[in-house]
């Protein structure tokens, strides 16, 4: 059993009774959400520029912008919930929020316990180090200290590779650890790390992971809600079709990332 699967199964076990009650009592959530007029979306709040807390203590970024626009086109307001990434699926299953719009990679393993809308952008795994580190291949990571965000798919990948790893809460902490030399390299989605380092003027070297293909980020919802998934997907498609997606992408990440 992989570390990632163990986390997912632990989350399911912890909320199993609650999920059973939800699945039997609420066959389809779309009508309930529309009656309330609010959809709660979750993210870590620690993944700039996709989602982060600004100086006004507001959660902003590409993820909340997409989530809010989807909600608007579905006739609802949006409520943003921030939570630790390593427990975010468990929170969804426990009905603490209605969807995860937090740059979650769509994987077959996650698809066993949630349903996905999207993808709404694509990215690739990359490895970052300080200039002159001599780290330019996966083989160079052997014996090095590698930093990752706790609960991301990259963590499972690094554990399977047998790397010496440290885990952190989010990208800002990862960048600080790399800058201060407490890790030799970090592994992250390429777009977020490149933009975040550029924003803070942090110099780096990077290379893409040659062993994996680009992946899609999706919106996670609880299983058994085809009407909700269909309407969210239609709203997302309309955002992409009418130019709104490109406007939001250019604002937050500097260009089209579909």
Image (tube, rainbow, N blue to C red):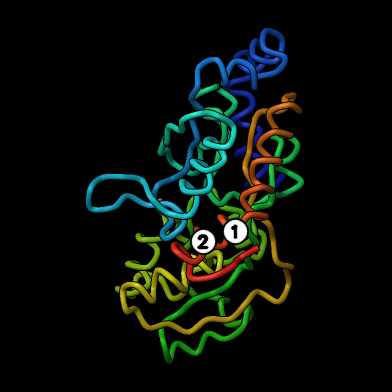
- In this rendering, the answer to whether 33 lies above or below 177 is above
Q: Quadrant of the C terminus?
A: bottom right
Any mark on residue 243, and which? 1
Q: Quadrant of residue 175?
A: bottom left
Query: Furthest-left residue in view?
Result: 56
- In this rendering, the answer to whether 178 lies above or below 132 is above
For mark 1, give the secondary structure.
Answer: loop
Instruction: Tell whether 175 sits left or right of 85.
Output: left
Give the CA separation, mark 2 to mark 1.
6 Å
- Camera-side residue: 239 or 184? 239
- In this rendering, the answer to whether 152 lies above or below 26 is below
Assess disc 2: are there few (<14), some (14-19) or many (≥20) residues with their C-alpha within 10 Å of its C-alpha. some
- Camera-side residue: 225 or 182? 225
Residue 98, horizontal then vertical, whole percent: 55, 28
Residue 222, horizontal then vertical, whole percent: 66, 28
Any mark on residue 173, and which? none
Residue 105, horizontal then vertical, whole percent: 64, 52
Assess disc 1: are there few (<14), some (14-19) or many (≥20) residues with their C-alpha within 10 Å of its C-alpha. few
Residue 56, horizontal then vertical, whole percent: 23, 48
Query: Furthest-top residue in view?
Result: 25
Q: Quadrant of residue 225?
A: top right
Any mark on residue 247, and which? 2
Instruction: Tell whether 117 sits left or right of 148.
Output: right
Q: Quadrant of the N terminus?
A: top right
Residue drawn at 76 percent across, 28 percent down? 226
Q: Is the residue under label 1 in contact with that under label 2 (CB below 8 Å)?
A: yes
- In this rendering, the answer to whether 63 lies above or below 166 is above
Q: Quadrant of residue 157?
A: bottom right
Residue drawn at 57 percent across, 76 percent down? 142
């Amino acid at each position: 059993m992989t570390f990632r699967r163990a986390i997912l199964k632990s989350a399911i076990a912890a909320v199993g009774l609650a999920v059973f009650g939800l699945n039997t009592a609420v066959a389809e959530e779309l009508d309930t959400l529309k009656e309330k007029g609010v959809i709660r979306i979750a993210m870590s709040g620690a993944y700039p520029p996709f989602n982060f807390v600004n100086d006004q203590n507001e959660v902003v970024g590409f993820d909340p912008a997409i989530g809010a626009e989807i909600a608007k086109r579905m006739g609802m307001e949006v409520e943003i919930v921030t939570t630790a990434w390593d427990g975010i699926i468990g929170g969804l299953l426990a009905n603490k929020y209605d969807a995860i719009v937090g740059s979650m990679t769509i994987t077959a393993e996650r698809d066993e316990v949630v349903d996905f809308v999207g993808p709404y952008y694509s990215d690739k795994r990359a490895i970052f180090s300080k200039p002159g580190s001599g780290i330019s291949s996966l083989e160079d990571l052997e014996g090095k200290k590698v930093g990752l965000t706790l609960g991301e798919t990259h963590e499972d990948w690094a554990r399977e590779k047998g790397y010496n790893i440290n885990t952190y809460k989010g990208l800002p902490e990862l960048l600080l650890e790399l800058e201060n030399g407490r890790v030799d390299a970090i592994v992250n989605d390429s777009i977020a790390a490149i933009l975040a380092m550029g924003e803070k003027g942090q110099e780096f070297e990077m290379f893409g992971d040659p062993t994996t293909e680009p992946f899609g980020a999706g919106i996670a919802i609880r299983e058994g809600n085809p009407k909700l998934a269909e309407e969210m997907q239609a709203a997302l498609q309309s955002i992409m079709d009418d130019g709104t997606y490109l406007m939001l992408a250019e604002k937050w990440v500097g260009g089209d990332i579909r």
